[in-house]
């Protein structure tokens, strides 16, 4: 079987995520035969550097021997068991490990299957907490503009990217939306911290006005990833935690995309020195091997549901594969690698290499900004650098970048007109330079007319 054979069979039966399938008439899906380290290989032997960690999940490269060995070992004993009324070693050990690593005070772990499901759990837990606490009037959520929290209906509702949300508006609950502290919009000479502080004033006013009806504020700490890798300063999170405490509103930290070292610390919230009431984790949790997510929360939240069965206070949310043993074992192996390889320190050097490799784009006439938080670097393409006029979305400049990248052996998947690097942590400085060189070529091609 060759690339064409597999692509043809695929298009006869599959419907791909986040894809206009008609695009595949001109650009067939690329069948991948194997992965090793940062590389993906198709059936013709072509290799592609995975610059986006396969949708931000793969931390330690494809085919990592340590994670593979852990999964093979787990297969010998237990693949899965119902987690209602039963338990197993990987689920217990992983919960213990995560609680030990998370901000102090997060002491309970509730498993789910994926990032959107974790957000659903956190939203429902917060709403249900206030109901159990005798405050049923607290039913609304506060969220940031340009945010993204997933595509199941609850998670979609508290997001604010029209491309994903607009079609389904009639089905969605109505959050209270506060303008994002996205530092792309800061004034010339204004620091990220000053701008983030200034933008917090609207959140403070919103909390003061709506605290009586609000369950929680939900945010993506430091980086709004699907919203174009827009970034803000940790001071916003610090001010938000203080304000939520003053107004009696929960804080939900959606660390699904930014957790596990992406921002330079294990969890992004650490950079603000805060502890949310709910922390949602997924993506890198298993190193990119199996779907798994969890919500970490406090003893106070847990206690609000702990009562006699007849009081009907239990949290009855469930998934068939909750706490899957194989996925938990992959996550444990992933956490082992953070310790064994001193990953966070190594990532600081890789982040520096990414910054150096992208510095050449600063003077490009169609690059408005290069921004970076840890192992996430984004390059914003614009039609006019002087006034930052964006390219019309219909021109699909990012698709031109994607297509050129593939011809040169690099998987870049821009978010609209934003090119970003979010590679596995096993990437080398030489591979980073190659990735950036190809991105530079792609930018020139995408902006030449």
Image (cartoon, rainbow, N blue to C red):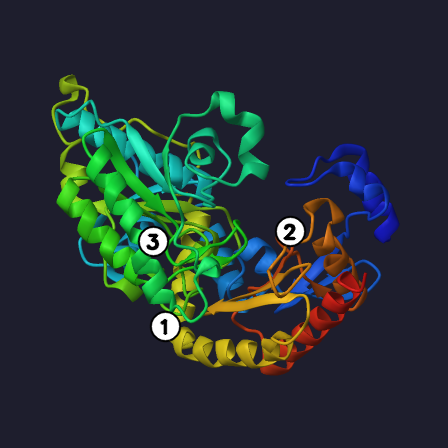
| Residue 199 numbered mark, or none | 3
Q: Vertical placement of 193 versus 18: above or below?
A: below
Answer whether labels 1 and 2 touch (C-beta < 8 Å).
no
| Residue 339 numbered mark, or none | 1
Locate residue 398, reporting x and y percent: 70, 55
Q: Residues within 10 Å of mark 2 (few under 14, many from 20)?
A: many
> Which residue in the protein does label 2 denote?
416
Q: Give 155 or 99, whichever is nearer the viewer.
A: 155
Q: CA distance from mark 3 to mark 1?
A: 37 Å
Q: Vertical placement of 170 versus 33: above or below?
A: above
Q: Quadrant of residue 205?
A: top left
Locate residue 83, reporting x and y percent: 34, 36
In front: mark 3 or mark 1? 3
Q: Vertical placement of 397 versus 156: above or below?
A: below
Q: CA distance from mark 2 to mark 3?
A: 25 Å
Q: Secondary structure at mark 3?
A: helix
Camera sees residue 38: yes
Q: CA distance from mark 1 to mark 2?
A: 36 Å
Question: What residue appears at the point 42 percent right and 69 percent down from the top-left corner?
Answer: 337
**Comes first in the chain, label 3 or label 1:** 3
Q: Give 192 or 187, whichever is nearer the viewer.
A: 187
Question: What residue appears at the point 46 percent right and 49 percent down from the top-left corner?
Answer: 326
**Comes first in the chain, label 1 or label 2:** 1
| Residue 247 numbered mark, or none | none
Answer whether labels 2 and 3 touch (C-beta < 8 Å).
no
Q: Give 31 or 369, whichever is nearer the viewer.
A: 369
Q: Quadrant of residue 181?
A: bottom left
């Amino acid at each position: 079987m060759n690339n064409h054979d597999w692509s043809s069979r695929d298009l006869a039966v599959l419907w791909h995520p986040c894809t206009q399938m008609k695009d595949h008439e001109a650009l067939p899906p690329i069948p991948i035969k194997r992965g090793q380290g940062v590389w993906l290989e198709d059936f013709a032997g072509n290799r592609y550097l995975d610059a986006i960690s396969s949708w931000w999940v793969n931390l330690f490269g494809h085919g990592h021997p340590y994670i593979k060995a852990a999964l093979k070992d787990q297969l010998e004993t237990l693949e899965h068991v119902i987690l209602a009324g039963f338990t197993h070693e990987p689920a217990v050990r992983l919960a213990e490990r995560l609680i030990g690593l998370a901000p102090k005070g997060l002491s309970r772990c509730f498993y789910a299957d994926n990032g959107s499901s974790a957000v659903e759990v956190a939203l429902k837990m917060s709403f249900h907490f206030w109901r159990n606490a005798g405050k049923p009037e607290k039913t609304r959520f506060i969220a940031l503009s340009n945010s993204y929290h997933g595509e199941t209906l609850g998670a979609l509702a508290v997001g604010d990217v029209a491309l994903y949300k607009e079609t389904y508006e009639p089905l969605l609950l109505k959050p209270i939306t506060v303008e994002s502290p996205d530092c792309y919009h800061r004034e010339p000479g204004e620091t990220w911290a000053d701008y983030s502080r200034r933008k917090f004033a609207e959140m403070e006013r919103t909390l003061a006005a709506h605290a009586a009806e609000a369950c929680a504020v939900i945010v993506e700490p430091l980086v709004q990833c699907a919203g174009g890798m827009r970034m803000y300063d940790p001071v916003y999170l610090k001010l938000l935690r203080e304000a939520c405490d003053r107004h009696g509103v929960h804080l939900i930290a959606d660390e699904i995309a930014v957790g596990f070292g992406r921002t330079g610390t294990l969890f992004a919230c650490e950079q603000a020195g805060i502890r949310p009431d709910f922390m949602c984790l997924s993506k890198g949790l298993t190193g990119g091997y199996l779907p798994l997510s969890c919500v970490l929360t406090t003893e106070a939240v847990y206690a609000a549901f702990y009562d006699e069965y007849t009081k009907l206070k239990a949290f009855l949310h469930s998934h068939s594969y909750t706490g899957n043993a194989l996925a938990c074992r992959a996550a444990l192996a992933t956490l082992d690698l953070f310790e064994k390889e001193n990953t966070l320190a190594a990532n600081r050097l890789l982040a520096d290499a990414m910054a150096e490799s992208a510095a050449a784009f600063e003077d490009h006439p169609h690059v408005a900004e290069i921004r970076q938080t840890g192992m996430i670097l984004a390059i914003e393409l614009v039609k006019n650098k002087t006034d930052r006029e964006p390219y019309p979305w219909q021109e699909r400049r990012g698709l031109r970048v994607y297509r050129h990248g593939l011809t040169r052996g690099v998987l870049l998947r821009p978010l609209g007109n934003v090119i970003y690097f979010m590679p596995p942590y096993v990437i080398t400085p030489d591979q980073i330079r190659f990735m950036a060189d190809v991105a530079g070529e792609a930018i020139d091609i995408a902006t030449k007319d």
